Image (cartoon, rainbow, N blue to C red):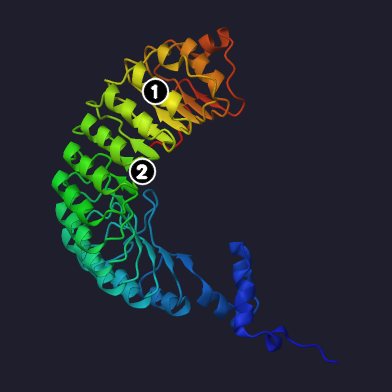
Amino acid sequence: MGSLCINEVLRDDELRSILSRLEDDKDKERFGLVCKRWLHLQSTERKKLSVRAGPHMLRKIAARFSRLVELDLSQSVSRSFYPGVTDSDLAVIADGFKSLKLLNLQNCKGITDAGIASIGSGLCSLQSLDLSYCRKLTDKGLSAVAEGCQDLRSLHLAGCKSVTDGTLQALSKNCRNLEELGLLGCTSISDSGVIDLVNGCQNIKFLDLNKCSNIGDNGISSVSKSCSSLKTLKLLDCYKVGDKSILSLAKFCKNLETLIIGGCRDISDESIKHLAASCKSSLKNLRMDWCLNISDSSLSCILSQCRNLEALDIGCCEEVTDAAFQDLGEVELSLKVLKVNCPKVTVVGIGNVLEKCASLEYIDVRSCPHVTQASCEEAGLQFPQCCKVNFAGCLFEPDVLL
């Protein structure tokens, strides 16, 4: 009996079934090296691609990878290439990649409203779009995206400083399924725009308003009332945000997992205590550095009630003392990252922390004048074996609280 070639025995659907069972990306690449038939099947089944190419090559890629779902054209800040992604490239993408659900254009600084409008008109199935630091974009192009990509679930616009309330209004009107919105540094948006946004987009789970300095209590209170499923809210340096916002979050957003309020100096103990009681089962990450009205009473509530808290930043909270870390009960804390940097905290307070935090991986005490490597050794403090202690600012910081 003569030997049979595998290509004579297996049908295309059977080969696709084999390919689908390969978990390692390198194995999937090797699959395509067997022969032209297998390469064609591998290409048509490929779902993700990261590429640097101009219009001519993009057309070839579109023809080869006909079922592509995720396309990454993002550029590195430090290693960008000239001229980078252009409006002509976006026109090819809009015409050739009709199945796309995710498109990453982060740091593609050359694209304009004309190019992004073609994405809106051509990719109606798009669900995730990252336009962070595409600084030439304005409300005109982004409104076209909102109107054309009405199934959009995730949109990131960090550093797009020309974005105003007009974009938020367009999202509210057209993108009712939006769950994730990043607006870091979009300083032209206001409470009015945020209120308009959540009137239509009430499924938001992730909202980044870091450094949006015109956002205050009215906007955040509207977010909490409309988006009860909110899990992540970032408000770094939103100095107009105060207790009203935190009390509203405590009342309506009981599944909140991450809250960034660093630099919100009007927030006080009262609202933080309510937050601790309301989100005691859900809160995992809390950053409140430079919240100058925070003291031992509210911090003690956070530590004693929020048993799932994994990361905490209380840097430059000048009223916090060792007393905040006393009387925490018998239960072990889940803290993995702790940034103290409070001038009144001493080795006594750090010692109390260590007794309750066996899983601690990183602790920052750079700005604690009473906590030095020598004083810790003298007090006989024992840090967990895997814990990195930042005494002098020379360690790489975890980004969980950014």
Which residue sits furthest right?
Answer: 1
Q: Position of residue 113 (x, y in %)?
A: 20, 64
Tell me the amino acid under the disc marked 2. Thr
Query: Disc 2 versus disc 1: distance between alpha carbons?
Result: 21 Å
Residue drawn at the location 57% of the way across and 14% of the way down: 381
Q: Secondary structure at mark 2?
A: strand
Q: Position of residue 295 (x, y in %)?
A: 33, 17
Residue drawn at the location 48% of the way across and 13% of the way down: 372
* Residue 137 in sight: no
**Disc 2 target residue:** 232
Residue drawn at the location 54% of the way across and 24% of the way down: 331
**Disc 1 target residue:** 301
Q: Position of residue 13 (x, y in %)?
A: 60, 82
**286 or 378: nearer the viewer:** 286
Nearest to the eye among marks 2 and 1: give it. 1
Q: Judge from the rendering whether residue 38 lies leftward or rightward of residue 190; answer left or right.
A: right
* Residue 53 in sight: yes
Q: Position of residue 128 (x, y in %)?
A: 36, 61
Q: Quadrant of residue 237?
A: top left
